[in-house]
Amino acid sequence: MSGKESKNNKSMVYYVNVKTDSDKSLIERLERMIDRSGLFKSIENGERVAIKMHFGERGGHGYIRTPFIGRIVQKVKDYNGIPFLTDTNTLYVHMRHNAIDHLRTAAINGFTTETVGAPIIIADGLTGSDEGVVKIDGNHLKEIFVGSAIFNADFIVVATHITGHPLSGFGGSIKNLAMGGASIRGKYIQHSEFVPAVDEDLCRLCGDCIEICGFNAIKQGEKSVFIMEENCKGCGECVGACKYGAMGPKFPRESKKLQEKMVEYVMGIRSQKKGKIVYINFLLDITPGCDCYSLSNSPVVPDLGILLSDDPVAIDKASVDLVNSAYFSPAWSGKNEEDSKDKFRAVHSDVDWRPQIDYGEKMGIGTSEYRIIKI
């Protein structure tokens, strides 16, 4: 079954609402959605299926729960695929910067072969240098560097926890596959022009950003911290670490260019896989910051459900639209009516999330026109 409707060229996005009158659990209804969509039928017998996800950082708790991942694993097996869970090492230096620490973190957060029913493989190897190269014709990039386990997989299931994000506004399937599928070199290329700026009036000199920076790029001054640009790698972890909003993009165009590079990475991976990618977005525990943070803040909106599609632009646009149509969670109830029209922009006011959607359409990786199929 195709993800496009032939009549009006809208992409089909399947949806199970967390609220239901059924006696079936959300996990059971996820399984039903996979079967009803027909998208897993593209898995051929014996194909190696990479379930691309995020294992979460130590201290956080908002990542996708293991029972959901375990059910996806089982469905891959039901369709005669050979599943494995995967992610790539981080550009920033913390507890997922190499495969040893990454696997330990995954286990601490509950992801093991025993809990999910499939092995875990860090896609770009021990130090983040195991990669495959894909030639593309992008406006920013002519080649991309993809973690070798993802590069060599026959099929990819992109399992994404929807969150806010300080560099891209929000994180969906596009970000998960682009940043999360890239080797460390690939991540650096995507982030290379991002340099944070410090708002001296907001900086409290708490030192959190200095502590989290693994590149010795942040120093303490008399009134605020300051950035040593020659050391900065653009990973953006200091932006997420600042509790006072003192860190942000130096120039608005940096976020736009980062998002466009993300799209070009997805474009390259899609060209290599030739229709062998399916996207599942989890709209649960929708926190303002991504799962790379070592804490999970209060969700922006209540739990909404799970989406499934073979179109990354459509599923991400549908995810944002569902978030914007929901009401703020109690912790965010102080936001005004204007804020509620764009939840992620209300949380990350300096970042516009739309370029990844607009550029994704322009580069042909999907369409923002979609039809919701409720399961």
Image (cartoon, rainbow, N blue to C red):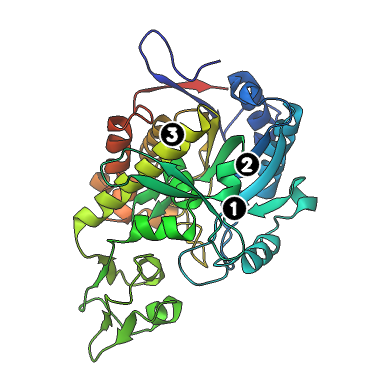
- Asked whether the residues under the numbered discs 2 and 1 touch, taking CB atoms below 8 Å apart as contact, a structural biologist would say yes
Pick the quarter of the image with the N terminus: top right
Q: Image check: 301 left or right of 101?
A: left
Question: Residue pushed farthest bottom?
Answer: 222
Helix, strand or loop for disc 1: loop
The spot of residue 232 in percent (x, y) is 33, 73
Q: Image check: 166 left or right of 117?
A: left
Mark 2 — residue?
50
Mark 3 — residue?
312
Q: Is residue 75 above or below residue 59?
A: above
Within the image, what quadrant is residue 207 found in?
Answer: bottom left
Please identify, in this view, whether the residue under mark 2 or under mark 3 is nearer the observer: 2
Q: Is residue 34 above or below residue 290?
A: above
Q: Is residue 162 above or below residue 305?
A: below
Is residue 341 visible in this depiction of the protein?
A: no
Q: Image check: 320 left or right of 294?
A: left
Q: Is residue 265 above or below residue 234?
A: above
Helix, strand or loop for disc 3: helix
Depth check: give the residue in front, 140 or 176: 140
Which label's residue is closer to the chain start, 2 or 1?
A: 2
Residue drawn 30% across the image and 40% down it: 138
The spot of residue 372 in percent (x, y) is 45, 23
- Asked whether the residues under the numbered discs 3 and 1 touch, taking CB atoms below 8 Å apart as contact, a structural biologist would say no
The spot of residue 319 in percent (x, y) is 43, 37
Mark 1 — residue?
123
Amino acid type shown at disc 1: Ala
Question: Residue pushed farthest top?
Answer: 7
